[in-house]
Amino acid sequence: MAARAHRRPDYADLTAEATAVPAGSDGVVLLPYFAGERIPLFDEKARGVILGLTLDHRRGHLYRAVLEATGYAARHHIDTMAELLEPPGRVIAVGGGVRPLWTRIVSDITGHAQHVPRQTIGASYGNAYLAGLAQGLVSRDDDWTTWADRVQPNPASHDTYQRSYAVYRKLYPATRDLVHALT
């Protein structure tokens, strides 16, 4: 029997499938700790966990759950900063996650609008700004950014994500000892 050629899905395929899945991935919640987790858990033994998977779920559910997991992680960071310092004044989307579906999911989960700059190479751009600030070449009031978009959270999706986020926050403590036993 000849082996069937398998084509890896491209980003457009995965995004289309994930877009067709409702907020909350039909009950799939994922911990994205595939290389441990630094802030705010400080646990190098943390690992990824998929909860709620059934035979009815498909690839689009899993991919959306991965995107949602990064949104839950972002919310966990925002919540931790708000507890220790203060809530963010503005959330800016930069880097590889600046994709329409992904920014939509993150805004819906966090409840914060995301400002999307025209230049999304955040780290190096931000480092240049900080270096200019330190050298007195720019002032704190200088704004290097021009905005391409602002993603507002969808209240209906946010309500759905509130329930899934509560599960997400309980999942790590509930599985920590089991995951550590495997590492």
Image: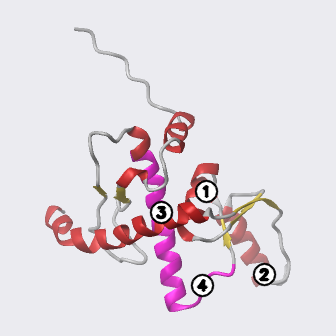
Secondary structure under badge 1?
helix
Residue at coordinates 29% horizontally, 67% vertically from top-left?
A: 46
The residue wearing badge 2 is 133
Q: Earlier in the sequence, mark 4 or mark 3?
A: 4
Kindly report which numbered mark, 4 or 3, lies closer to the viewer in this rendering. 3
The residue wearing badge 3 is 160
Question: What's the mark number on residue 142?
Answer: none
Tell me the kind of residue under disc 1: Arg
Report the Cα–Cα distance between label 2 and label 1: 32 Å
Secondary structure under badge 4?
loop
Residue at coordinates 35% horizontally, 62% vertically from top-left?
A: 33
Quarter of the N terminus within the rendering: top left
Nearest the eye: 62 or 153? 153
The residue wearing badge 1 is 104
Report the Cα–Cα distance between label 3 and label 2: 41 Å
Q: Which residues are magenta?
A: 62-89
Say above or below: 129 vs 85: above
Report the Cα–Cα distance between label 4 and label 3: 22 Å
Would you say the residues marked 2 and 1 are in contact, meaning their CB atoms lie under 8 Å apart? no
Residue at coordinates 39% horizontally, 39% vertically from top-left?
A: 59
Tell me the kind of residue under disc 4: Pro
> Is 95 contained in the magenta span?
no
Q: Residue 112: percent from the left, percent from the top?
A: 63, 71
Q: Earlier in the sequence, mark 3 or mark 1?
A: 1
Name the residue furthest left: 181
> Is 66 contained in the magenta span?
yes
The residue wearing badge 4 is 87
Residue at coordinates 54% horizontally, 86% vertically from top-left?
A: 82
Q: Earlier in the sequence, mark 2 or mark 4?
A: 4
